[in-house]
Amino acid sequence: MKGILRKLNYLCLLLFFVSCTAGPLKNSKSLEDFFHDENLNYIMDNEGDFRILADGVSILKDVWIRGQLNHSGSVAIREIFSVSLIISEEELDSLSRVLLLDNMQTRIMGSWSIMIEDNPDSINKNYLVLYTVKAGLDSDNKYILQAVREAAEAASTLEQVLSPGI
């Protein structure tokens, strides 16, 4: 009987330590706990993505954290991004060069990307300019918060530079 109790105790300890070593943001509940701990206002969209609402102080623009993970082999990556602006096809070439220089000279955590705006009602082809940070599934809260802030700051800065009236 003592042997069984001892094994049960070891099993309980093992389960406790395994659960304590799990990464902090592995599921939507972990993300929701993170938002609460950091006092971030957010909404969840119908695709399961989280939109952190700008507060104008530490988060300058809305930031999205994708609910779905990207997998490559045994690595799971989460995308954190902020939309800076929407540009026309005519503005695309010159802005692409500016963003490439910015990526090489000043960006540490993330990079700029441009994608076609998914708007079937629009006659013109427009492009979204995004600043995206990729975070490993085992990233801690401090890294995720810094990624959120960098995405918001980079997107806000580019918007102010290219749209000075804002």
Image: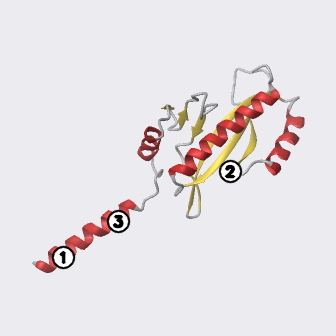
Q: Earlier in the sequence, mark 1 or mark 3?
A: 1
Separation (CA) of disc 1 from disc 3: 17 Å
Mark number, residue 17: 3
Type of the residue with mark 2: Met
Under mark 1, the amino acid is Arg
Residue 159 percent coordinates (x, y): 75, 29
Residue 43 located left or right of residue 154: left
Question: Relative to residue 11, is residue 103 depicted above or below?
Answer: above
Relative to 84, say whether 20 is above or below.
Answer: below
Q: Where is residue 69 in the image (x, y as percent from the top left)?
A: 55, 50
Q: Which residue is drawn at 56% across and 45% down?
A: 145
Lower position in the chain sequence, tag 3 or tag 2: 3
- Can I make out residue 116 in this image? no
**In the visual, does 70 lie left or right of 95?**
left
Crowding near the residue tagged with mark 2, few <14, some 14–19, many ≥20 C-alpha atoms within 10 Å: some
> Is disc 1 placed on a helix, strand or loop?
helix
Give the class, few, some or many, for how many residues have Cα within 10 Å of label 3's Cα (few <14, many ≥20): few
**131 with respect to 51 (left or right):** right
At 72% across and 51% down in the image, what residue appears?
A: 108
Q: Can residue 59 be seen in this view?
A: yes
How is the rendered protein coloured? secondary structure
Measuring 45% from the left and 48% from the top, which residue is drawn there?
Answer: 27
Report helix, strand or loop for mark 3. helix
Residue under numbered circle 2: 109
Residue 22 sits in which quadrant?
Answer: bottom left
Relative to 52, say whether 146 is above or below. below
Rounded to the nearest angstrom, the CA distance separating label 3 from label 2 is 31 Å
Q: Specify the amino acid type for callout 3.
A: Phe
* Left or right of residue 161, residue 43 in this image: left
Q: Mark 1 points at which residue?
A: 6
